[in-house]
Every structure is written in C-alpha cells, then in structure tokens.
Image: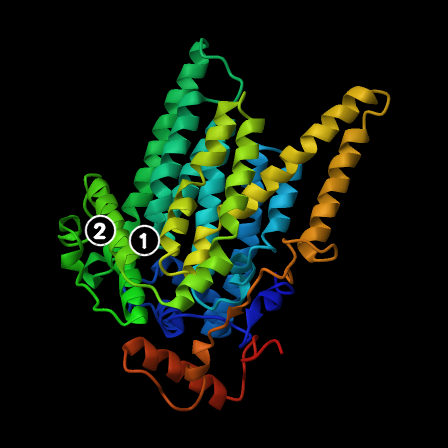
Amino acid sequence: MLWFGPLHLRGAPLTGTDFSQYCEAVIAAVEGRAAANPHRSALVASALAPLAARAHALDALFLGAVASTALLAAGAGAWALAVSGRVAAVAAMLACLSVAPIALLPRTVSFYPEMAAAFMVASAAAAWACARGGLLACVLGAALVGLAPLVDLRGVIWFVPCAVLVGAGAVLGPEGEGWRSLGGWARRLVAVALVALVLLGAWRLGPRVWPANLGGTLEMQAYSQVQDVARRAGARVPFLRDVDAACRGRGFAWGHGGAAEFPRVGACLAAVNAVASNLPRVEESRLAWSRQGAPWVPVLATGFALGALRHWRRPRRALALLGAAVPSVAMLASAENEPDLRRLGQALLAVPVALGVGVEAVLAAPSAIISRRLPQFPRAPAFVEVAGVVLFALLVGGVVPSPLSPVARWRAPFTAQSEYLQYDGPRVMGREAYDRVCATALAGRAEAGWAGAIPTRPWP
C-alpha cells in the first residue's frame, strides 16, 4: 500500500481532512479528558493514545492508518474466503491495491482508516457467520459487527444488515448440519442467545464512546455532507430541521435511546441523501465521480453476479456475499453526491471482494475442464489457479498493462490535502479548541528539536 499510494496521488505526501480534530482527540485521550469534537470516537482515540504518549499524535495517527489498512486487506480476504475460496481471498487482498481510495488509506492522517477497517471487518465477520455458521463464528462475528458503530456512528449503516446476517448464521447453524438433531437445535438456541448478548453489550458500551451531552449524532454526521455539497456549489445550506420531519428530535447516538430509533434514523438518512442529491453539483464533483467512483460500479456488479451464479446451489454463501455488501453499496450511492476520498474509501470496500470472487469464478471453469480431461494429473487445477492469481497480480501491479494497473489511462490521481501542515509550526492557527490544542502540540514538538518517528514529509 505504501508503495502504491503515490501512484494514485498528486500533490502533498499525506492526505487528511479535519486533521486537527483527530489530532486533538488523540491528545485528549492521552490526557484523560473528553475530545472537543463529539463526532470523533473515544474508542479509536484511546487505542492510539499509548503510542501518542510515547511518540506523538501525528505518529500515532499515521501508524494507526498503516495498521488499519493492513487489517482492511485481511478483512477483504476473509470475506472472500468465507463465500468462495483461497483464490478469491488472495485476489481480493491484491485488488485492494487497485482501488485508489483504499490504496491511499495508509497516508490518511485521520480516523478514516480505522473506520474503513472496522466496516470491512464487520462485513467479513457477518459473511463468515452467515456462510459457515458455528457458535464461535457467530459470537465473534457479533462482537466485530458491534464494534463498527463504536468506531464511527456511520457504522450503524453496517450494523443493521450485518447483525441480521450473523443472526441468520446462528439460526441456521454450521454449514451442512441437519435440522432434525435435537443437539443441533440446542446449539442454535445457545448461539442466538450469545449473539444477542454480545450485540447488547456493544450497545451498552455506546455511552462510554459517544456521550450524549456532547451533541454528536448520526444525523449531524450525515448532514455534514449536505453542507459540503451546498457550499461547494455556492447554494444556500438548508437547516437540518428543514430536511425532513424524520430528522427532528434530539438525534441518534449509539447506546442512547432504544431500538425504536432505528426506523426513524433510516428515514432521516434517506431524506438527507435525497436533499443532497437535489442540490446543484459543480463540475469538479461530477468529474471526480466519473473518474473515481463510476468506473467501479460495473466491476462491482459483474464480480458479484459471477459469484452469485457460482454459488446459486449454496444460497447461504450467495446471501453472505451480497448481504454483507449492502452497506458499502448504500454508501456508494451516497458518495456520488460528494465523491471525496473520505466517502469513496468506505463506499468502495466491496469492490476488492467482488474482484476476488470474480477471479475465482472465472478460473473455476478451466480448472473443472482440466480436472475432467486430465484426471491423471490431480494437481493440474491447482496450477491453473496459481497461474491465474499470478497473472492477476501482474495486472494489478501494472507489469502487464490493464485497466487495473495504477497507471492505466482512465485513472486520474487524487489531489492530496495537506491540512496538517498548517498546524506544524510555531504559530497557533485556527479558531476552534481542537485547532489550538493540535497546533500547540506540533509546535512544542518542533521546538523540542525532535520530529518524532514520522517526519513531516516522509516521502518525496
């Protein structure tokens, strides 16, 4: 990822949006206080705090982004493995290099890499629980699905469909197990009960991560997209209360309120997205979508169609493949309104999995033919699969020219944002509390004559 990133980037070496907010959140976790911005997960900040205490907040954010991207790639492989096989898993991990917003996550100094990793892992865990079943897979899947809204409130979009898949896996039991066994039914009841307890536990942890008195709500997270679209187009920014009656109330924060809030939140998010879709879009946004988002839509559809056709006799696997992709596809529809790196990184999470599953589906036919024609060579199909994966790696790496290459003609590199650089100096910039805290910390680091583990400009 670190080597592929620059091929998708134009401008500064690191990308970041709202950098000072994430920087301040990590510093707040080190100091044991609440962050100034209520939309930044205390869970992620606390996870990065030990490194920040020993080095610096910038180092913690950067290394957290690298580790999160590695976890994301592993999640893509696990998802593909759950529904297809080893070839799909390897191809899915390789395909992460070809999707520019994902390949750029290691260079994004924010909590977005952690968010993307948590969402990918949630989809992978749900797919595994649904496709394979089993007590351990369902309980672990419930824990990982419950983690998504604790990393970011937008994880609720992943939580609902993924929790349904995990529940389905608990009810259906291990793959291939019969329904008539009394012991099998007992195990299913235990699995369902444990899944419900784990998900309830994730809900109970919400107030520790999202204190309601700080005002962070899912509606405001979604509404920020409306603000971005309107301001970029020079249009009047509508008030949240004008968007739709469904958005009225105190707002939704994970762990506060009850299950009755979920339908209202869904209606509000749909209303907010409809308003964003009706706002005028500047040519820059249209061009960005045509270059960064639209080309992956047919790839996503083709890969999942091939996977669903291959597994039509195993409906649990087809359901796991398609059901776990619902959240990222929903985000993809929303990202068309504002196709920046932050939103596309989450919206394209299913693309590497679709590519991986598609590669295995394509290789399945020649492998089957060779197995029938050359039974005296039982390892021949495996050689075909290995050769196919190697060829796919060459296509992704650009050694063999293809649309998947990082230097393919259709690609347009992202213009990098280097917002953090404005805070890295002796002068405190910005008016908000998080601006001042972060700038002061970076200035203190510079005055101490120590640049930390990660220099300001780590790559040319």
Name the residue type under label 2.
Answer: Phe
Total labels drawn: 2
Instruction: Decide which of 183, 377 is in the foreground and name it.
Output: 377
Q: Which mark is residue 252?
A: 2
Above or below residue 419? Residue 185 is above
- Between discs 1 and 2, the one toward the N terminus: 1
Q: Is residue 369 left or right of residue 20?
A: right
Task: Say which residue appears at 57% left-offset and 47% top-offset.
Answer: 74
Q: Residue furthest toward the right?
A: 376
Residue 168: image x %, image y %? 40, 27
Mark 2 burial class by Cα count in 10 Å: few <14, some 14-19, many 20+: many
Tell me the number on the disc at residue 176.
none
At 55% across and 59% down in the image, what residue appears? 100
Measure how far apart labels 1 and 2 are at the Cα level. 9 Å
**Label 1 amino acid?**
Leu
**How many C-alpha atoms fall within 10 Å of the one at disc 1: few (<14), some, or many (≥20)?**
many
| Residue 228 picture location, percent across and down | 31, 66
**Is residue 274 toward the left or the right of residue 104 in the image?**
left
Residue at point 34%, 28% (across, down): 193
- Which image quarter holds the N terminus? bottom right
- Asked whether, in this view, residue 251 is left or right of residue 140, the answer is left
Q: Secondary structure at mark 1?
A: helix
Residue 356 found in image quarter = top right
Work out whether 168 lies above or below 355.
above
Is there CB contact under 8 Å for labels 1 and 2? yes
Q: Give 360 or 197, whichever is nearer the viewer.
A: 360
Which label sits on residue 153? Answer: 1
